[in-house]
Image (cartoon, rainbow, N blue to C red):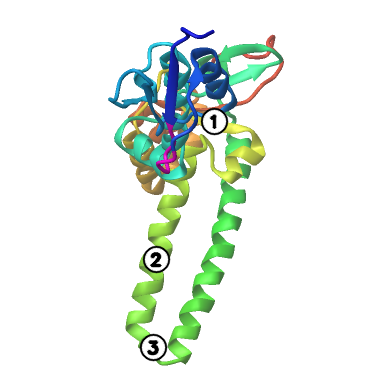
């Protein structure tokens, strides 16, 4: 139509496209040809406006902007930062198509905790062997002396072992050993908990683990001392709804 309003598009690299109709602009936006960095003006007006400010393109481009922001923030480091600064995300298990509350899962028995612990210890033993070989190489090359190489190896193993438990339980809910045996840690009431709670749980495991059998079999809740002190509970995954009863 002769009186139809036309628009000019300036691409992100500064190239100006031929005048087109509003309908064509909508199609180009749907096809992804018009991006968030494009500018648009009417052939009757000399001023350029960002494409996202054009009323009939705004809904589509705002959706693309939201997707772009989500993609930029959905990286490993941003997720890590969010979980360190905020809290451990809620854990939901799925039984078929029905989501279930993890607080309904039963407390894990001592034997399954022991097997998960042994599995993690085997992984850390292999890691310790790798650190030992690296330290032996540094000592053989006379890069480090006998005293410094021991302390460096010990501190590196201690730090990485602590991170192994804290990050795996915070970022992935379970350590590899716990995942292998189908158990994970939750807050006793099933609510979300801060990453710091995982840290204190791990630190308490070191002096309190020897008392675990006595508390599991002696306490009414069947929880270990470190769980009682941090108000957490180690549960096991059960897919049969009839067996999913909280102790």
Is label 2 or label 1 in front? Answer: 1
- Regarding mark 1 in the picture, which secondary structure is present there? loop
**Which comes sooner in the sequence, label 1 or label 3?**
1
Question: For residue 143, which numbered disc appears in the image?
Answer: 3
Mark whose residue sits in front, 1 or 3: 1
Which comes before the other along the chain, label 3 or label 2? 3
Q: Nearer the viewer, mark 3 or mark 2?
A: 3
Q: Is residue 223 above or below residue 137?
A: above
Mark 2 or mark 1: whose residue is earlier in sequence: 1
Residue 189 x %, y % = 42, 16
Image location of residue 13, percent across then percent down: 42, 43
Label 3, residues with CA under 10 Å away: few <14, some 14-19, many ≥20: few
Neighbor class of circle 1 (other Cα within 10 Å; few <14, some 14-19, many 20+) is few
Quadrant placement of the C terminus: top right
Residues rendered magenta in the picture = 10-15
Residue in the picture at 36% in, 73% down: 152
Secondary structure of the residue carrying tag 3 is loop
- Answer with left or right where residue 29 lies relative to residue 196: right
Answer above or below: position of 155 versus 86. below
Q: Nearer the viewer, residue 166 or 231?
A: 166
Q: Residues at badges 1 and 3 in contact (C-beta under 8 Å)?
A: no
What residue lies at 46% left-to-right and 7% top-to-bottom? 3
| Relative depth, front residue between 234 and 212 | 234
Distance from the alpha carbon under mark 2 to that under mark 1: 51 Å
| Residue 74 numbered tag | none
User: Residue at label 2?
Assistant: 156
Q: Is residue 30 left or right of residue 226?
A: right
């Amino acid at each position: 139509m002769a009186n139809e309003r036309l628009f000019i598009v300036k691409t992100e690299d500064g190239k100006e496209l031929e005048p087109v109709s509003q309908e064509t602009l909508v199609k180009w936006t749907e096809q992804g040809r018009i991006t968030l960095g494009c500018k648009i003006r009417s052939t009757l007006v000399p001023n350029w406006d960002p494409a996202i400010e054009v009323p009939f393109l705004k809904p589509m481009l705002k959706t693309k902007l939201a997707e772009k922001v989500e993609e930029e923030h959905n990286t490993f480091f941003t997720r890590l930062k969010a979980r360190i600064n905020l809290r451990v995300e809620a854990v939901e298990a799925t039984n078929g198509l029905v989501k279930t509350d993890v607080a309904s899962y039963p407390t894990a028995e001592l034997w399954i905790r022991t097997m998960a612990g042994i599995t993690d210890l085997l992984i850390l033993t292999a890691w310790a062997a790798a650190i030992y070989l690296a330290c032996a190489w540094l000592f053989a090359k006379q890069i480090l002396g006998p005293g410094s190489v021991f302390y460096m190896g010990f501190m590196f193993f201690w730090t990485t072992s602590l991170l192994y438990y804290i990050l795996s339980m915070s970022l992935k809910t379970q350590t590899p050993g716990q995942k292998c045996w189908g158990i994970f840690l939750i807050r006793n009431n099933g609510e979300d908990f801060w990453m710091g709670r995982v840290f204190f749980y791990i630190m308490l495991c070191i002096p309190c683990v020897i008392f675990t059998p006595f508390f599991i079999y002696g306490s009414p809740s069947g929880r270990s001392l470190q769980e009682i002190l941090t108000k957490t509970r180690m549960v096991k995954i059960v897919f049969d709804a009839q067996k999913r009863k909280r102790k």
